[in-house]
Image (cartoon, coloured by chain):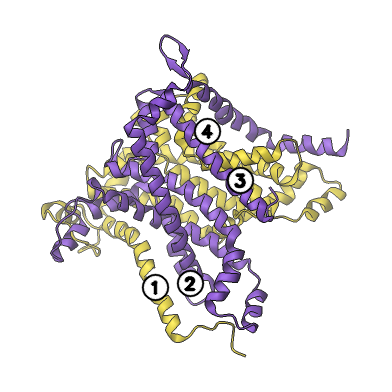
Chain colours: A purple, B yellow
Amino acid sequence: MTAKKREAISGLTFAAPFLLGFAAFFVVPFFISVVFTFTKNANGLKFTGFDNYLDLFGNSAFQTAVYNTFRFILIGVPLIMVLATFLALLLHKKFVGSSLYRSVFLYPLVVPVAATVMVFQLVFAESGVINTIYAWLGLPAQNWLASDQAFYVLMILYLWKNCGYNIVLIMAGLNAIPNAFYEAAQVEGAGRWQTFRYITMPLLAPSFFFVFVVSIINSFKCFREAFLLGGTIPHKSIYMLQHFMNNNFTNLNYQRLSTAAFLVFIVIFALVFVLFWMRRKAGDIQL
Amino acid sequence: MKRLNEPSVCAKTGRYLTLTLFAIFFALPIVYTVMNSLMSPAEVQHYYSESGQMTLHLLPDQFSLEEYYQILFRRPDYLMKFFNSLWPVTVIVVGQVAISSAAGFAFAKFRFPGRDILFFFVIILMMMPIQVTLVSNYIVLNQMGLIGTYFAIILPAIFSPFGVFLMRQVIASMPDELIEAAKLDGAGNWRIFLQIVMPCSKSGVISLVILCFIDNWNMVEQPIVFLKDAGKYPLSVFLSQINEMNPGLSFACGVLAMVPVALLFFFYEKELIEGIGFSNLK
């Protein structure tokens, strides 16, 4: 047996328990549900081609869900990346209290979702804290959770909860930049902005790549908050793809759910593929 | 020579001011929950329903542990829920750490056919909302006859791809020479894994424990879909329903639900931060 073969066998042995579970719970059933998307459940399965897809595209609940999910990601992800970078830069150089601030920013990550949602419900309720403040200021009360404002309440929750994780990721990236680069820049007479633009930003790019991935993951996880805030059918502005899928699961409409799930898979697959292709082009990835 | 980029007094003040403003925003919901849990039920009642308008009532008029007493000694169902959450989550964390450390080692330090493509799919799956695999999981769990049992929420969670991803990143950052040296000394792969790789990835394992614990402690969708019986629901699902009943009790419930994770956080914050840093794709 060659050394190469032996290495492959050892590697597969270590990966085996995971690969088995991965195959059993994700890969194999996933292909089964892809087959579902081309069938109709009428006295046994019947092949129907792309009917489920056409049906789904015409479904107004699905359209709303796609629109909201994309809107949430397109606004939330850039916002959280800018905010986290800003706070990470402020915290980067050690000073009295810097680690305390970092802990405060990270702590929301560990607070149970339900406890957070409870506070947000009380704060944003019709007779809640925000409306009381509005009344003092002579502004009309808003129905925060049952109007278009619900979207922004959810956005605040998302930023509040996940910013700390991103700050830590970006700070790790900042720490990896050799100080010599900054010293050289100073000798050359570079200003603050120039240093940031031509040293910090490019060297932080690999961190941004992962922060971007994590932020998308977390924006999907934010569904828990949306679900606890608004139940199975929340206000239209926070009706997400996950609501759509969950509700179709409850209605036993597996075909429709599988079709939506497969489309989400395709979109994420394309996104990850493009990201990796970009990084491979940049030439600094070993994957 | 002046230290590099030494900020002026003005810049320093600005930095503190900005950070403090943000810190207040981040800390307020937590402080609010803790403070309200220390009020008597009557006080909470007074501020939240009788007056009609709620005010930001932060300091208790009178400190009271009444709510905690109520939950811990008068409401056995709460402790049941706590336990319903704690044991499945513990099983998930132990299982996930064991399985994903081994797989992470394989992905980081061995070459085998299909490795890179498999890892690519691990990343894609990691990004997917869990609803995407809802039907898939249901089909398998149903075949295995596990729907309605705790294994239905435990098994899929153990194989969650995030753990493999994190451990692969951590182990990949270890120098190959370390492993080569052990091999020259005649150590087998298992020995290398248990005595070199695992001790060296302590911060990675600790952050995986914390992140995995948080994720599953907050589980909401899976129990609702896979457990069927509301009596089996864990704390996370129960908490979301209790606040419709009594705001006073729910604050104390919220604080108690925070305890296990908060303890992990306070004891292992340094490792958590180091481990999160590792997860950067390098």
Which of pointers 3 and 1 lies earlier in the amino acid sequence? 1
Q: Which residue is mark 4?
A: B156
User: In the rendered view, does B149 fall on the left or right side of B28?
Assistant: right
**Label 2 residue SS:** helix
Q: Which residue is mark 1?
A: B18
Q: Which residue is mark 2?
A: A90
**Label 4 residue SS:** helix
Q: Which residue is mark 3?
A: B165
**Label 3 residue SS:** helix
Q: Is residue B19 above or below residue B7?
A: above
Give me the residue at 41% from left, 45% from top: A70
Q: Amino acid at mark 2?
A: Leu
Which is in the foreground here, disc 3 or disc 4? 3
Q: Are marks 3 and 4 on the same chain?
A: yes
Q: What separation in Å lies between label 3 and label 1 (alpha carbons)?
A: 35 Å
Q: Amino acid at mark 4?
A: Pro
Which of pointers 3 and 4 lies earlier in the amino acid sequence? 4
State the quadrant of the C terminus of chain B: bottom right
Q: Amino acid at mark 1?
A: Thr
Q: Is residue A272 above or below residue B265?
A: above
Q: In this view, which residue lies farthest toward the top?
A: A43
On the image, the x and y values in percent for residue B271 come to 57, 58
